[in-house]
Image (tube, helix red, strand yellow):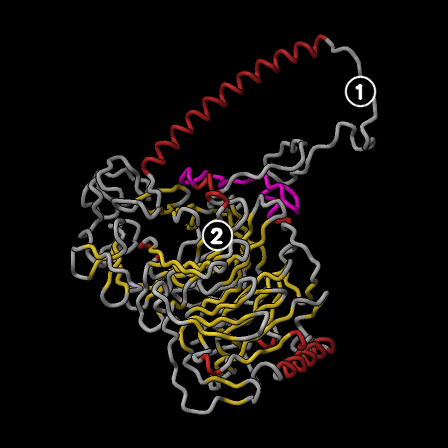
Amino acid sequence: MKGTIRGYDLLVILVSLGVLEGTWAVYPESWCSAGEAKSAFWNDKMYIVGGHFDDVSNTKLRANTELVVLDFSRPTADFQTDTSLISTTTIPRSLAPSIQNWANVYASSSSLYIVGGDPVPHRPYDFSSSSFVPEPYKPTFLEGSIQVYDFQTSEWSRRPPSSEVPDSPSCAGSGSSTELGKAFILAGHLENRLIRPPSMLIHDMQRETWRNITVKPYLAGLEFAEVVPIAGKVGTNNGGVLIVFGGHTMAPGEVRTGNDYKRIHVYDISTDKWYIQPARNATDENGEVPSFRTQTCSVLASSEDKSSHNIYLYGGHDPSDKLPVYNEVWVLSIPSFTWTLLNSQGEARFDHTCQRAGGYLASWGGRNTYYTDKSKECTSRDSPLNVQLLDLGTGKWTSIFEKDKEYNVPKKLLATLGGDEKGGAVVQEPLGGYLNSEVALLFPQVKKKTSKPPKSNSNLQDLSDTQDPTDGNDPHGTREPNRKSPSIGAIIGGAVGGFVGVLLICLLIFFLIRRNRRSARTDSTVAELSDNSTGTERLWAFSGSKYGYYGVPGTPGFRSNAGDVYGVPDTPGIRSNTGDVYGVPDTPGTRSNTGDVASTFIGDTIVRSELDGTEPALEAGSTEVSDKKLFE
C-alpha cells in the first residue's frame, strides 16, 4: 500500500539509526552533515582535517578540532555499518590555530602537511569530552606557517613562514603526487585578505623546498579548481604534467563565474609552461560535458599500461545559482581529452573531500543542499559513517570495500577509448587534434604490448586483438598451412589490390603534408600560453563545434570565436582587425565579443587585463604595468 513502510524498510531504517548513534562515539552527537574539510591518503588510511559538523537546525555548528582517520587496511570492510573503521587523533592545542576550512592537505611518504585555509568561524568542539571548547574563542590566522604530522612518530610540528610562502592560501586548487614527490597549490585567495594572486606554490617534498611562481593572469581568482598531477612517461623529460579544470572565478562583488569544462589547462612541470587543450564529449562532438560546477572532488586512475589516465569527477554545485547540487560522476580521459558520464545514480554532494583507495573513490562529508536552503536534508541518514564508495571499475556505488580489488578501465570508457580493462587504448590523442603541437609531445603514445594487429572497427565497440591464424583451435600453431597454388583470379586480384594500395599510400602522403602545413600555420598563430609569452594573450574560446581565438591585434583574416573574420571595426559582437573589442579597450568592465570581462578587479585595488599578456596585473585606474608580486 502506497505511503506505508514495509517491514524490511523499517529494519533498514532502524539499523541505520543504530549505526548513526554508534558514530556519536567518534563524531559529534546528533550530527547532520559535515563540510569544508580536506584530506590526504597514506598507507591505507584517509586523513581528514578541518571543516565543521552541523545539526539539522544549523544552531550547533561545531568546528572539527580532530584528525579524523578512515581505515582501508582490512581485507574487506563495510563503510555503511562498521563504526570501528573510524578513529580520531587530537591535534595539540599548542598548534593553534589547528582548525581550518578548505586547507591544502596532502601527504608525502613520511608526513602529512596542512597548508593554509581559512580560520573556522565556529566554536571548536572537543570530541573527547563531547563539549565545546570553553570561551572565549577568537579565530586566528596561520600567516604562512605550515603544520606537519609525522606518520612514524605521530608527532606534530609547526614550521614558520618562509620567503616563498609568506602568507597562507585558501580555497585554492591543490594536488600532490608521491611518485613525483611534489605538491601544487594553485590560485585561491590569501587567508587574511581577499587578494587573489596569479600564483602557484610548488612544494618539493623530498628536498623540503618551495617555489612561488607566477601563472597566467586568467588563472588569478580561480577557486576550488581540480589540480591533478599525472606522473609516469608524460611531460618533458618524463617530468609529469598537471591537469587543471573546473572550479569558479570570483569577479567584483564576490560574483562567481563557472570555469568551462570544455577548457582544460595543461601544465608541463619540467618547463613551467601552460597550455590550453579543448575537451569534448566522448561520443558526440556537440554532446554534453559537465555543466558549470564547483566544490567538486576528483581522483586519478590510470590504466595498467598508462595508455589512458582517467580522472573521476564527483558532485559539486552550480557556482552562480548555488543550486542544484549534483550527484553525477564524470570521467575526463587523458590524452584523448574526452568526457564520459559514468554514473548519475548516487547521492548529491558538494564541499566533500575524496581520495583514491585502491580500486575505489572514497568520499567523506559534504552537503546535499546549499547553506541557505531551508529544506535541508541530513547526509547522515544515507551515509551513517559519512563515507561513500564508488567502484572505479564498474562505476557503481557500494558500501563494501575490498582491499585486493585492482583498477580496471570501465566498459563505458572502453566503448570509446578501445582496448581492454588493463589498457591498450586505441584513442590516445584528442579526436580533433591538439590545439598546440607541443602538447602532443607531452603525451607520447603507448604501444600495445602484443604484436597482433587490432580488428578494423570504426566505432571502437570491439577492439580486441585478431584471432591467431590457427583459428584458436590449435594454440601451438602446428597445423600445416594450405599449399594450393594461387589461381589466375587471385593473381589479377593481387595486382589490382597492389595498385589500389599504392594509390592509397599516395593519398595518405598528400593528406599528411597538407595537415602538417595546416598545423604549422596554426602553431604560428596560436599562443603558447607559457611564461615566456609576449604580447597579447590569445585565449581559447568555444563556439558550437568550432574552435576559435580572440585577442590577436593586427592579424586580419584571423577568425573570431563566432566564426567571423575580423574586418568591421567598432561593430558590437565582432572584433576588428586591430584587436579592438566593442567598447573601450583596457577599461575595467569592458566586455569582449565572447562576453568575458576584459579587465577584472582582484580585491579592491588590482585589476587583471585579458588584453595584456605581458604582466600579471595592472593597478586600478593606471595605464602603467605593475610587476609587483602579490605574495610579497
Q: Which residue is mark 1?
A: 481
- When the figure is inspected, residue 472 is found, relative to residue 319, above or below; the finding is above
Residue type of the residue flagged with mark 1: Pro
Closer to the camera in the image, 352 or 143 = 143
Question: Could you say whether the residue bearing mark 2 is in a helix, strand or loop?
Answer: loop
Is-magenta flag for residue 435? yes
Q: Quadrant of the N terminus?
A: bottom right
Q: At which x and y percent is residue 462?
A: 66, 39
Q: At which x and y percent is residue 103?
A: 45, 70
* Disc 2/disc 1 C-alpha distance (Å): 52 Å
Q: Quadrant of the C terminus?
A: bottom left
The residue that appears at 37% across and 65% down in the rendered structure is 165
Closer to the camera in the image, 288 or 613 = 613
Residue type of the residue flagged with mark 2: Val
The residue that appears at 47% across and 45% down in the rendered structure is 235
- Magenta residues? 413-438
The residue that appears at 68% across and 65% down in the rendered structure is 401
- When the figure is inspected, residue 124 is found, relative to residue 455, above or below; the finding is below
Residue 266 in view: no
Q: Residue 71, located in which quarter of the rendered image?
A: bottom right
Q: Quick one: label 2 or label 1, which is nearer the N terminus? A: 2
Question: Could you say whether the residue bearing mark 1 is in a helix, strand or loop?
Answer: loop
Residue 125 circle label = none
Residue 289 circle label = 2
Residue 205 in view: yes
Q: Residue 136, located in which quarter of the rendered image?
A: bottom left
Q: Is 85 situated left or right of 563 in this image?
A: right
Is-magenta flag for residue 579? no
Q: Is 283 situated left or right of 121 in this image?
A: right
Q: Alpha-carbon neighbours of circle 2 within 10 Å: few (<14), some, or many (≥20)?
A: many
- Which-is-in-front pick, marks 2 and 1? 1
